[in-house]
Amino acid sequence: MTPENVLVETSRLIDGKQTAEDIKVEIAAEVAQRRAAGHKVPHLAAILVGHDGGSETYVRNKVLACERVGFASTLLRYEDDITEAELLAKVAELNEDPEIDGFIVQLPLPRHIDPDKVIEAIRPEKDVDGFHPMNIGRMVAGLPALLPATPSGIVELLARQGIKTSGKHCVVIGRSNIVGTPVSILLAKNLDTANCTVTLCHSRTQNLADICRTADIVVAAIGRPEFVTADMIKPGAVVIDVGTTRVADASKKSGFTLKGDVNFSEVAPLASRITPVPGGVGPMTIAMLLLNTLRAAKGEIHPK
């Protein structure tokens, strides 16, 4: 079902769920080959602090995805009163554990913990979220790196859906270190799957709607539900919606509904291709996290 039951031709929906499933099938086949050859299966660990509803869901889906592809997985849970020093000690322990090929610390963290300090404490070769400054720096320099999962998932989704990027104008809305900035870099790379002319917009951008209307591809990663409206989209543009915000909805059993950064009901009729929420970018993030874990286990980026 598409968001808000808006009728959109199936051919125009970008099915991130199926594309992610295709990637998982490929990973599972390689893991089976590694097991048959007597190699250790990849092992992903996740640290979850507190009881944020969104984080609980994301981590649960990551654990299920590990099972799907034949990975070993470990979930480490802590209450939100854990000290920064205690969390950093656990990160150091995982860094030294030879059984753990890669691990993540689920964000956001409680306010008393500095997320940058935690990210920098993770060894780059085990940083399967792709957030460590060394991995980001290698990405910018065009060197092999464990790439940020969501940005690389967006690029992979466009490529596997056969959406042409070379020579296209892409507008990225949002400059976060996790999505907006790295995806702008990846889409501008001199690669067959990129070669876009990229405009990175943010909270200080003037005439945002005018700029967006010049885009062949719009990537909305601002974290504001339904921010992108019809007057911001050029007819025929490709729209990638990164947002997943829980909005109160008494009609739902869960008490909330997921909203993207794009007003789907307004924008979908204009777009040539569009990602739904959920079922678009989200599944790709998990698929690329698994791919990073496999690459880490193989020592492809940072040889062991």
Image (cartoon, rainbow, N blue to C red):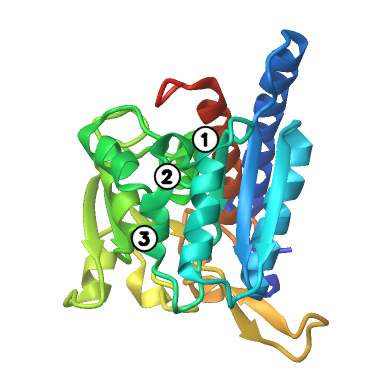
**103 or 282: nearer the eye?**
103
Q: Where in the figure is residue 171, as x and y percent of width and height? A: 29, 58
User: Residue at 70% across / 88% down in the picture?
Assistant: 249
159 with respect to 9 (left or right): left
Residue 292, label in figure: 1
Task: Give me the C-alpha separation between circle 2 and circle 1.
Answer: 8 Å
First in sequence: mark 1 vs mark 3: 3
Residue 130, label in figure: 2
Examine the image and state in which quarter residue 30 appears: top right
Residue 117, label in figure: 3
The answer to whether residue 293 of the structure is visible from this angle is yes
User: Residue at 62% across / 62% down in the picture?
Assistant: 48
Task: Give me the C-alpha separation between circle 1 and circle 3.
Answer: 22 Å
94 with respect to 118 (left or right): right
Q: Where in the figure is residue 120, as x and y percent of width and height? A: 36, 52
User: Residue at 60% across / 41% down in the picture?
Assistant: 287
Element at label 2: loop
Task: Give me the C-alpha separation between circle 2 and circle 3.
Answer: 15 Å
First in sequence: mark 2 vs mark 3: 3
Are circles 2 and 3 on residues that touch, CB within 8 Å?
Answer: no
**Amino acid at dot 2:** Gly
